Amino acid sequence: MIVSRILIRSFKQKYSHICRTLCSAQKSNATTHTEKTYPISGTRTVFNGINSQTMFAPQTALIPELTPGEILVKVRLASICMSDVHTIRGQRIEPTPSVLGHEAIVEVVTHRRPESDLAVGDRLTFSIADSCGQCEFCLTGLNQKCIKLFKYGHAKLSDGSGYNGCYATHIILRRGTHVVKIPEIISDRCAAPINCSLATAMCAMEYVPKAKNGRAFVQGDGMLGLYTCAALREHGFERVYCSGTRLQRSKFIEHFGGIPLYNDEILEEETNKIDVVVEVCGVSNVVNDGLRLLKPGGVYLFVGMVHPHSQLNITGEQIIRKCLTIKGIHNYAPRHLDQAVQFLEKTFKKYPYEELIGPTYDLSDLSQAMQISIEKRYGRVLVKPNVLTS
Amino acid sequence: MLGERIVFNGLNSEKMFSSETVPLPELAPGEILVKVRLASICMSDVHTTTGQRVEPTPSVLGHEAVVEVVAHRRPESDLMKGDRLTFSIADSCAKCEFCLKGLSQKCTKLFKYGHAKLSDGSGFNGCYASHIIIRSGTHVVKIPNIIFDRCAAPINCSLATVMCAMEFVPKIKNGRAFVQGDGMLGLYTSVVLHELGYETVYCSGNHIQRSQFITRFGAVPLYNDEILIEETNKIDVVVEVCGVSNVVNDGIKLLKPGGLYLFLGMVHPHSDLHITGEQIIRKCLMIKGIHNYAPRHLDQAVDFLVKTIDKYPYEEVVGPTYDLSDLQNAIKIATEKTFARVLVKPNMK
């Protein structure tokens, strides 16, 4: 009896040793399965279009096996970008049916990137754009215009597995998608908006010159506006004005290093004196003010007006006489996602990022969460899926 | 010593141009007294006489010329009497924030030849005259013998402005460009892009007779909309040098994502743009306004011309020369745009 127990124990020990070896071999090879069960299915909220009977409908679907380079992630927390709000209000058209949502902090469930140092449980942010890395645009650092571009939250349900957007329990990140680990110091709530709003602001900053005693004017007090204020201040700008439509945001503007501007008088005084103007409000009627404020040689960044109702009422003469530069910023490239995470980590204690973020709604309450977003009381409204325990 | 100048009295005056002979003043430190060898008529002066542009009056117009040193007070320079020079349109202070960051054309104390009141200084402020007093903040560049007067005259507005525009043009492998305008600016821009290594440079305009010049300046004449459609989203750089805003929509369509649009010509109020912010954002475009140039661009212009003077038919695009006393007639011929430039030469006493 004792001998058999000893035999059994040594057999078990050998077996678990073999298992452990196998498992660690599996981990180092990063194969498709972990010790836990591979999730068989997930849930996504499908957008059927604004004219359909149910605009949003939950759908449970199988999660397929991963192909090389893919990462299966679960959504920890998603945030609602204003562009999604515009989609459900009909100001933007996205393909339907689709899964919306492109801002989220996610967690690795499993992956097929053996050359990477990704581990199960890693918290990640990921590039909105999946790009090929080989076309002329990718090769010149303009991945967001890749000829084979795929954008999370902007793709048809029938594209791939359909796990293409953040209003879901899971996302399958494709192999051309850049990912960045989120340092521990950054909470989920602050991490969610990184991969659209903050990364886009980093892309915009690439075109901002260093200006001694620089003065800037940020037109818009939403998430983009507040991030841009902080980024300009960190870049060394001495004075950053920020204007918007919500007087209640003025204290946030101050906390993010800006000077709230709801008063036309200051605008008059600063005519021809501003080095950089950044449009982040999505409204074209601010552009004339911006052009007037810019000093000769100044830079105007257009970031928000990504919709057709953005007619500009300006002349070529205005741009020529002041030797102005106007630069359009749409999305960003992989390096900007890295810069965004670094920026947030570096300044996490300096600016009240948490305070900008509003309440969290369950994924099943997406319609309600969108309604609250429309009211623009908060910089961001969050959505959290019920995650299947694994 | 006396000098003659043609005073512009404004559109609505009895005599638009009148001749005036006055003593030339003593020079102040840094100034250069030059005689005008040959002036050329820039289209902006044509626009002034047709009322599309407003200049102070009375004034002496004309800001493009090749000149010759008569006397100077720049002891630290190597200038000599008889030197042929081109000179910067802008007189600038070199100390303000704009001069210090290389944007001298927006100097806080800017003075522009051909754009100043007669009462400003000695009044010898423009090129439609026998002499000009070049001020102490004006950059000058000697013209090598290899460049004749006819080719030298348009350097200090047209060619130098093009060099300024080129500062923003990236060197691109197999680059494609589109020049909107076939005037002096358009032809210079075509040839500079060609020399910069751009594989295909299209050039469009109104004057089909210019098409043979366009070809000889290294570009593909474009009077055909079909090519425009094929090249949608494929052009790296578009340059507006025609002064007309309705070409801008075409330009934006042609640009590839990340492309560059240079605006040079539309320096007048009737330049409404009918474009959306979305067009600029979705393609991540850059639009850059180019107005005049800085001193370094004048040097670059002369260097470029020296390097390429035998390669391109610069002489042939320049038209006839009129006597200074015939200025009004010369301007009328310039208006017809038969030639890229019409020249004016003062009778020297």
Image (spheres, coloured by chain):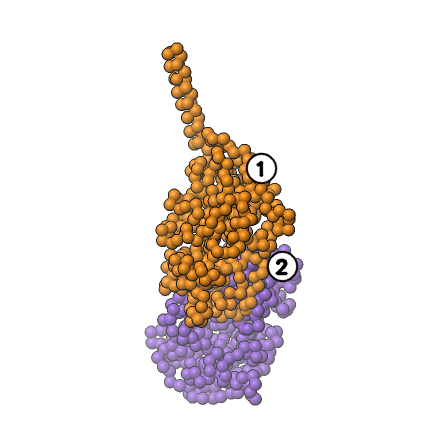
Residue A218, numbered label: none
- Given residues B33 and A36, the one toward you in this image is A36
Q: Mark 2 = which residue?
A: B228
| Residue at image point 58% right, 54% down | A89
Farthest residue to the left: give it: B76
Q: Colour of chain A?
A: orange
| Residue at image point 55% right, 73% down | B269
* Residue A187 in sight here: yes
State whether residue A17 is above or below residue B18.
above
**Badge 2 local density, few (<14 within 10 Å), some, or many (20+)?**
some
The secondary structure type at the circle numbered 2 is: helix
Q: Return the chain for callout 1.
A: A
**What is the C-alpha distance between the residues marked 2 and 1?**
47 Å
Nearer to us of marks 2 and 1 is 1
- Given residues A113 and B148, the one toward you in this image is A113
Q: Mark 1 = which residue?
A: A61
Q: Position of residue B101 (x, y in %)?
A: 39, 66
Q: Colour of chain B?
A: purple
Q: Position of residue B138 (x, y in %)?
A: 41, 74
| Residue at image point 60% right, 52% down | A93
Q: Return the chain for callout 2.
A: B
State whether residue A290 is above or below residue A59.
below
Q: Which quarter of the rendered picture does the N terminus of chain A lie within?
A: top left
Amino acid type of disc 2?
Leu
The secondary structure type at the circle numbered 1 is: strand
| Residue at image point 49% right, 62% down | A245
Q: Position of residue B330 (x, y in %)?
A: 57, 80
Amino acid type of disc 1?
Ala
* Residue B163 in sight here: no
